[in-house]
Image (cartoon, rainbow, N blue to C red):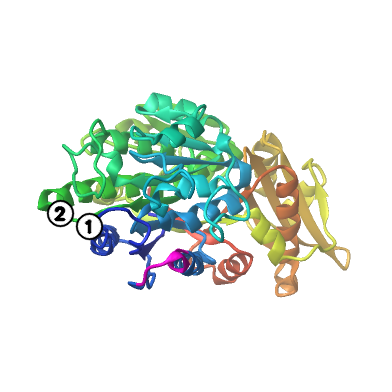
């Protein structure tokens, strides 16, 4: 699975609850419900009170988030811990971001309208540009970016301000409200849950969502959008049974959010590299391109929810009829992997999928002399020259020449010879990086960096804020290049092959 960072932020000073100090233990327990986290960070929150504490805590949370590029779960604490994570997501995704605010309350008060004066009731309004001095972000959210989910206890001033903001209580309404955003930040205040299902919060409100409804709604979001971040807040441990409920909820929500980028990338990668034939059978996608030996051109993709008892004879017959070994591409944590191993399939080509923000790659590379064309004609000669496979000419004719997405074909020439190349394919906010290669005699001279930088600048012009690429594990020079340019590992996949 993709790597996730858990940031434990046990802030309680923003809460109006008489039992707010329980939030410290709640944050610890929440963070512990993600056992497979790649990294854990605990923000040092003091027991001091006063207006200065919230700003100091926000600065600490911002520092804890600095430089992190994968999925981050912020485990609160009161809702005020979401100030910096949401602001960071806005800086990254801009107007393409939607914020879904799961909360019984609107958190839309100002210091002047708040009955309690507690900051956790002002967080969303602060993110929208109106809040206590020193806490309003440099780039506020726009109203059009906000969707309330499960909100049912708004103060009069909040209700007036919220007029026109969508409030969703089911999956269909939520998805319709989010619309055409490219990324979503999910804020989950646990008081969105009905007290009959979960009561360990400081301000329970009747008529809330069930854990199952929340899971369904977040899963739907993750199935369509990249999840830009996740915050879970306001857990005040009081009942033992609520910890069990919370474990199931957090596990399901985190699983859904972790796979959002996997789906975003794999869907685009599938489309970017066309196969000669794609046949769908029983949920499988069977790819075949005659004359070509590349794995991605001649392999099967299993259904997302594969039944361990389902037969795969039709998959094996498809490739045997075409005189090809049976090859299956497997993503992270697929149960089919063990079943294929038991049938004699060997593992092949473990691959890391890496992603980056295009702006980071542009910033990490300098403009350099390259040849860039949006037509493959002249570039295909370079591809045939530098590609290390025997089927390069056929790949150019049957695959590259058929790429439908906007594409850039980049090459670098040194001393009259092709020194390096890359192919970039754009698709609705993302661009894939393919066919990166450098002539052995030109390695270590910045050729690949120049290609990558030129492709990133082209991708930015196409409106692609994110980049993805696949690199075989063990290719340390390439991994080093991509890491220095701002790429981080999203997930991995491999093949299972049966001759």
- Labels 2 and 1: the sequence-earlier one: 1
Residue 48 shown left or right of residue 489 in the figure:
left
Q: How crowded is mark 2: few (under 14 residues within 10 Å), some or many (20 or more)?
A: some
Q: Nearer the viewer, residue 40 or 443?
A: 40
Q: Which of 285 and 488 is in front in this view?
A: 488
Residue 433 shown left or right of residue 107 in the figure:
right
- Residue 18 located within the stretch drawn in magenta: no
* Numbered range of the magenta stretch: 48-54
Question: For the view shown, which residue lies furthest in the right direction?
Answer: 416
Which residue appears at 33% of the width and 64% of the height?
10
- Residue 53 located within the stretch drawn in magenta: yes
Residues marked 2 and 1 touching at CB (< 8 Å): yes
Residue at label 1? 19
Label count reads: 2
Residue at label 2? 238
Residue 329 shown left or right of residue 20 in the figure:
right
Residue 437 position (above or below residue 498): below
Residue 299 showing in the rendered view: no
Which residue appears at 43% of the width and 35% of the height?
148
Quote the CA–CA distance across marks 2 and 1: 10 Å
Which residue appears at 75% of the width and 67% of the height?
447
Element at label 1: loop
Element at label 2: loop
Q: Position of residue 265 (x, y in %)?
A: 52, 45
């Amino acid at each position: 699975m993709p790597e996730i960072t858990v940031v434990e932020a046990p802030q309680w000073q923003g809460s109006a609850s008489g039992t707010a100090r329980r939030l410290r233990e709640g944050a610890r327990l929440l963070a512990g419900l993600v056992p497979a986290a790649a990294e854990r960070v605990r923000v040092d929150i003091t027991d001091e009170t006063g207006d200065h504490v919230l700003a100091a805590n926000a600065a600490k949370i911002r520092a804890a988030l600095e430089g992190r590029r994968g999925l981050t779960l912020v485990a609160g604490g009161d809702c005020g811990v979401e100030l910096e994570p949401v602001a960071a997501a806005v800086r990254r995704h801009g107007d393409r971001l939607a914020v879904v605010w799961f909360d019984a309350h609107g958190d839309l008060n100002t210091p002047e309208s708040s009955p309690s004066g507690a900051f956790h009731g002002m967080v969303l309004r602060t993110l929208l540009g109106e809040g206590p001095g020193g806490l309003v972000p440099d780039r506020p959210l726009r109203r059009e970016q906000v969707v309330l989910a499960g909100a049912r206890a708004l103060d009069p001033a909040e209700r007036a301000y919220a007029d026109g903001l969508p409030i969703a209580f089911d999956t269909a309404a939520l998805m319709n409200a989010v619309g055409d955003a490219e990324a979503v930040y999910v804020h989950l205040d646990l008081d969105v849950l009905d007290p009959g299902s979960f009561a360990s919060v400081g301000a329970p409100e009747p008529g809330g969502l069930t854990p199952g409804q929340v899971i369904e709604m977040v899963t739907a979001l993750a199935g369509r959008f990249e999840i830009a971040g996740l915050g879970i807040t306001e857990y005040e441990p009081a009942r033992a049974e609520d910890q069990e409920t919370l474990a199931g909820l957090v596990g399901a929500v985190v699983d859904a959010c972790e796979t959002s980028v996997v789906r975003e990338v794999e869907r685009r990668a599938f489309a970017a590299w066309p196969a000669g034939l794609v046949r769908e059978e029983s949920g499988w996608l069977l790819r075949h391109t005659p004359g070509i030996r590349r794995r991605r051109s001649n392999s099967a993709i299993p259904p997302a929810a594969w039944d361990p008892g389902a037969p795969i004879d039709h998959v094996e017959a498809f490739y045997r009829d075409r005189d090809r070994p049976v090859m299956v591409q497997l993503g992270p944590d697929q149960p089919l992997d063990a079943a294929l191993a038991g049938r004699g399939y060997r593992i092949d080509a473990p691959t890391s999928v890496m992603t980056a923000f295009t702006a980071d790659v542009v910033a990490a590379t300098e403009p350099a002399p390259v040849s860039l064309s949006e037509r493959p004609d002249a570039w295909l000669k370079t591809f045939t020259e530098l590609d290390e496979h025997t089927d390069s000419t056929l790949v150019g004719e049957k695959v590259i020449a058929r790429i439908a997405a906007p594409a850039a074909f980049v090459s670098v020439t040194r001393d009259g010879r092709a020194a390096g190349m890359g192919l970039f394919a754009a698709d609705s906010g993302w661009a894939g990086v393919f066919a990166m290669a450098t002539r052995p005699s030109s390695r270590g001279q910045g050729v690949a960096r120049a290609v990558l930088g030129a492709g990133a600048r082209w991708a930015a012009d196409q409106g692609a804020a994110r980049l993805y690429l696949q690199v075989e594990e063990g290719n340390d020079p390439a991994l080093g290049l991509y890491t220095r340019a701002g790429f981080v590992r999203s997930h991995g996949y491999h093949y299972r092959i049966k001759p």
